[in-house]
Image (cartoon, rainbow, N blue to C red):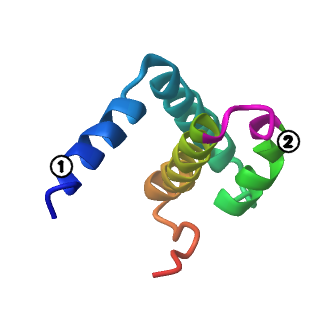
Amino acid sequence: MGDVLPLLMGGFETALQPQNLMFAFIGAILGTLIGVLPGIGPAGALAMLLPIVLNLNPVGAIIMLAALYCGAMYGGSTTSIPAQRRANRHPW
């Protein structure tokens, strides 16, 4: 139980590096831009940008894919809220 706090701090240290924050920002912006397009959901956004992410380091790639997924989920609701229509169905 005593090893949890150092491991948690190490995870935050890795996630808050400027390079990883840049990957998160780019992923969220691209996910939002792709999520706004009709018919392209988060799975389509991940599939389209997977070749780009394969050239990154593993930590940056996972951070970018997670931000891309969140941005695509948010982008789908961007057009559905003003139109008062239902967005993509959530799996939960």
Q: Residues within 10 Å of mark 2 (few under 14, many from 20)?
A: few
The residue identified by callout 2 is 51
Query: Relative to 13, is 59 on the left or the right?
Result: right
Query: Relative to 89, is 18 on the left or the right?
Result: left
The residue identified by callout 1 is 5
Q: Amino acid at mark 1?
A: Leu
Residue 4 x %, y %: 21, 56
Q: Is residue 31 above or below residue 80?
A: above
Q: Nearer the viewer, mark 1 or mark 2?
A: 1
| Residue 57 on the magenta span | yes
| Residue 86 on the magenta span | no
Q: Residues within 10 Å of mark 1 (few under 14, many from 20)?
A: few
Residue 43 x %, y %: 71, 62
Q: Earlier in the sequence, mark 1 or mark 2?
A: 1
Give the quadrant of the C terminus.
Answer: bottom left
Give the quadrant of the N terminus.
Answer: bottom left
Residue extending farthest to the front is 2
Rendered image quadrant of residue 56: top right
Residue extending farthest to the left is 2
Rendered image quadrant of residue 29: top right
Please state the extent of the stretch shown in magenta in the rendering: 52-58
Residue extending farthest to the top is 18
